[in-house]
Image (spheres, helix red, strand yellow):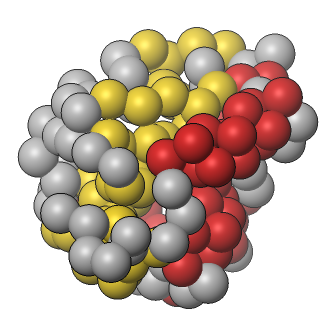
Amino acid sequence: MAQNNSFPVKLFIYDLSGGMARQLSPVMLGRQLDGIWHTGVVVHGKEFFFGGAGINNCLPCGTILGQPNSIVDLGYTEVNEDLFQEYLDSLAESEYRGDTYNMFEHNCNTFSNDVVQFLTGKKIPSYITDLPSEILSTPFGQAIRPLLDSMAVNPGGNITGQR
């Protein structure tokens, strides 16, 4: 519910590895990772996310990922739905087109961070935004980067080759 023309903003956090990162990361990377994070921003009754198909939205928890592993309450925004949609349309035409997706450098978490800053002035947790550089700093990360760079993951259900 809105309070005094304010709307709640939440970050939905999903582990794309389904728990496998926690089990395999010490062996593969030499360090413990708790998950491979995908995020979506929930505001105005919808969940907004970015992937290989560009900016998408659905009802909260409506992606193939189901229920989030955790939800972070980021407070409230005074940005109304119309202004937010204009902002998203602008992003979709410029920096968040599907062909700009990059698993490590321009991904769902980059999008969530930009959107949350627009809405609240806050950033999403650094353990999410720092994950790509943490993985890439390992020998395994360097070895698999070319393969991962050639793929785009769309939480709506598709894995597609990057354009």
Residue at 50%, 28% in the rendered image: 56
User: Which quadrant, please, contains the C terminus?
Assistant: top right
- Between 39 and 77, the residue placed more toward the observer is 77
**Quick check: 41 left or right of 92?**
left
Q: Is residue 133 above or below residue 163?
A: below
Q: Nearer the viewer, residue 63 or 144?
A: 63
Q: Residue furthest right?
A: 94
The x, y position of residue 41, in whole percent, is 41, 55
Q: Nearer the viewer, residue 18 or 138?
A: 18
Quadrant where the N terminus sits is bottom left
| Res. 26 image quadrant | bottom left
Residue at 88%, 36% (x, y): give it.
Answer: 94
Reply above or below: 96 against 98. Answer: below
Relative side of 137 to 12, left or right? right
Quarter holding residue 9: bottom left
Q: Is residue 120 above or below residue 139?
A: below
Q: Above or below — where is 91 with respect to 31? A: above
- Taking the image as shown, residue 117 lies to the left or right of residue 13, namely right
Image position, residue 148 (x, y; %): 64, 37
**Residue found farthest to the left:** 67
Residue at image coords 57%, 42%: 82
Residue furthest out toward the front: 4
| Residue 102 shows up from this direction | no
Q: Is residue 5 visible?
A: yes
Q: Position of residue 44 (x, y in %)?
A: 35, 49
Tally of numbered tags: 0
Residue 130: quadrant of the picture:
bottom right
Q: Residue at x 42, y 31 (%)?
A: 57
Camera-side residue: 122 or 87?
87
